[in-house]
Image (cartoon, rainbow, N blue to C red):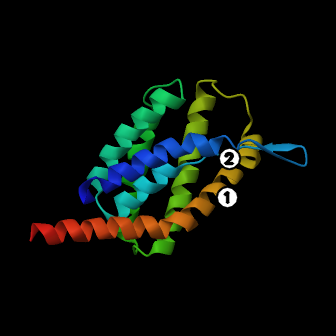
Amino acid sequence: MIRSIIPLIAILLFFLEPIFSLFSPIEINGALYTLVPRFVIVFLIFVAVYYSRQRAILYGIVFGLLYDMFYIDIIGLYAFLYPLICFIAATIIRRIHRHIVIVMILCLFLVALLEILSYLFASLISLTSIGSEEFLTGRLIPTLIANSLFIVMFGWIFKAVINKRVFKVTRESL
């Protein structure tokens, strides 16, 4: 059971994302704000930082393809972006300390990068019609606020589960 805890959490988060996206868009004072939950990539960043870069990239490819097949019309976009984000997270964390607060800030930065790259790609192929200012105020900032709440609430749990899994597996292999 302990070996399959990381994929099980990722699967659970994959199925929770569309449930939380039902709360979006939110209308406040006549303006619409779109909140995009990015639970899977946040968890994969924690896997890349605290467990294994290779596993995070592999899970990124799998869940990116699943995300492409189930939620968007373009196959390969998130299958490329998820592993890229995991690779960037693992590369950055090699140069800085793995403190939980630093990892949470890194997660928020990488979620913003993911949103910006997906917006740029959608703009490039004319899949979206919103302007950059509307994207910034109506989607990016609300998405970062919502995901920062998720990161603060579950980042500690992700770190504890991953560390417990790593400790348990290494202890059993001795």
Identify the residue at image location x=55%, y=44%. 17
Q: Which residue is mark 1?
A: 145
* Residue 51, percent from left and from top: 30, 62
Q: Which three-letter amino acid code belongs to the residue tagged 2?
A: Leu
> Is residue 76 rendered to the left or right of residue 149?
left
> Is residue 114 rendered to the left or right of residue 95?
right
Instruction: Measure the C-alpha gap from mark 1 to mark 2.
Output: 8 Å
Q: Nearer the viewer, residue 153 or 56?
A: 153
* Residue 9, percent from left and from top: 40, 53
Q: How many marks?
A: 2
Q: Quadrant of the N terminus?
A: bottom left
Q: Which three-letter amino acid code belongs to the residue tagged 1?
A: Ile
Residue 60's place in the image compared with 93, above or below, is: above
Residue 7's place in the image compared with 174, above or below, is: above
Q: Quadrant of the C terminus?
A: bottom left
**Disc 1 secondary structure class:** helix
Identify the residue at image location x=47%, y=35%. 67
Residue 14's place in the image compared with 4, above or below, is: above
Q: Which residue is mark 2?
A: 35
Q: Please report contact status of discs 1 and 2: CB closer than 8 Å, yes or no.
A: yes
* Residue 93, percent from left and from top: 38, 66
Identify the residue at image location x=58%, y=40%. 18
Say which quarter of the image contains residue 95.
Answer: bottom left
Say which quarter of the image contains residue 127.
Answer: top right
Q: Residue furthest front?
A: 1
Q: Residues within 10 Å of mark 2 (few under 14, many from 20)?
A: many
Say which quarter of the image contains residue 22.
Answer: top right
Which one is earlier in the sequence, the residue at label 1 or at label 2?
2
